[in-house]
Amino acid sequence: MYKLLIADDEPLEREGLQLMIERAFPHMFTIFHAEHGRSAIQQVEQHRPHIIFMDMKMPGIQGLEAIAEIRKMDAQAKIVILTAYDYFTYAKEAISFGVSEYVLKPAKKQQMIDLLQKLLQQIAEEQAMREQQLAAREKLVQLQALGEIAWTWLFMGKMDECAAHTFTGMEFESGYAIVVELEKADACEREKWEEKMKQCIKQQRRCLCSLLNQRQMAIFIEAKQDEHVISFVQSLLKQLEKALQQRVKIGIGTIQSGVDGMKRSYKEASIAVRYVSSFSRVMHVDDVPLTDEVEQTTIKTGGSVIEQVEMFLQENYCYDVTLEEVAKYVHLTPYYFSKLFKKETGQTFIDYLTNLRIEKAKQLMRDEGLTVKEACYRVGYKDPNYFSRVFKKVTNMTPTEYRQDVCERA
């Protein structure tokens, strides 16, 4: 049922209008009366009517003054001015207060019925719009919450990429992960610090936030062009400590693109935060000291990182393989991968790949009888002369000398 206020200093006018409305719209309205402007303001404050019929000339507070006060309390009500005076100044000022209609007395019955039908239609449409907006807002909040859970599951390996995008639909052209760890953890305060952290970070940058545990949160931040990541995160750390009223430390991953890149950056940030020397500090993964313990954090199903690399190179040595491509394959930064590879194999990546290719070339000439040129192309070299120089540097003989030596022994 709708609420309607009739504000008019003439009782017969109020009663006549009410009778007409109740006959045309039975059981649709609860109708209130006000005999002057002050009473109209009080009635609006108390009942919040959907529609107000306001006479212009009343004792005390006039119609336009009352409307001005009413608009301070209620911006939604439909206000119709009723007056016996056809003053343009009234109409002009009324428009500034968002008045719906300006009706001259005496109004015809059909005119008032048509007007009420129009106003009711507007009210219904506005209510439907507000409900849609509220539903959309609630859905957005739910999707954001589900999205954050989905990204956490994705990076923990509990959900595939397709399913995660179903929840989030959010993708950065490029971005990086940070893992923020609190010095103190209180389960009762978790929701409070989680919300404060999200607000602080989202004011700075477009991002995704994923709660990891009672003390840690992973944040995936959209990168800006030519950004100095460490400086930005150091500034962010100070803001977080001020907002949370406690110390934090932050591990930083490298700038990546796509879901695989974000996974890699998250893994790097997780490693880095473990090696921050104290709270109120940040550490980039490239600055993590290389230790046996760190290497253990990179172990995956099927063997260690180096074992994976060795298997990969056995299958792909004949292609143009770069250190950057292999580092990406095992989800490490090129810098960190290079240090780890040298530590585990005693060789640089280039030396290892070169030695592997030369050994394969020797095997092809020895076991399959390939010519020097054929072996050169089979192991990934495009220039036989360059191949010969590399071969001699590694074996102290040219490939032709090696092939002759093998043939003589046979």
Image: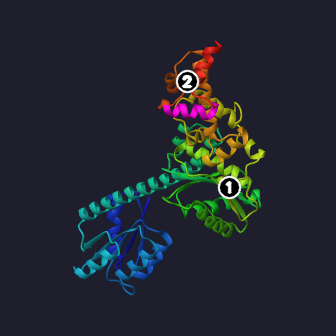
Q: Does residue 172 show up? A: yes
Question: Please, which residue is most extreme toward the top here?
Answer: 410
| Residue in the picture at 53% in, 37% down | 162
Distance between the alpha carbons at the discs numbered 1 and 2: 46 Å
Q: Say the numbered circle drawn on residue 287.
A: 1
| Residue in the picture at 69% in, 44% down | 340
Q: Which residues are magenta?
A: 385-395
- Residue 146 picture location, percent across and down: 58, 47
Picture quarter containing residue 17? bottom left
Most foreground residue, 258 or 97: 258
Give the residue number, with chain letter if any, for mark 2: 400
Question: Cβ–Cβ below 8 Å for labels 1 and 2?
Answer: no
Most foreground residue, 185 or 238: 238
Secondary structure, mark 2, is helix
Q: Was residue 309 drawn as part of the magenta stretch in this picture?
A: no
* Quarter of the C terminus within the rendering: top right
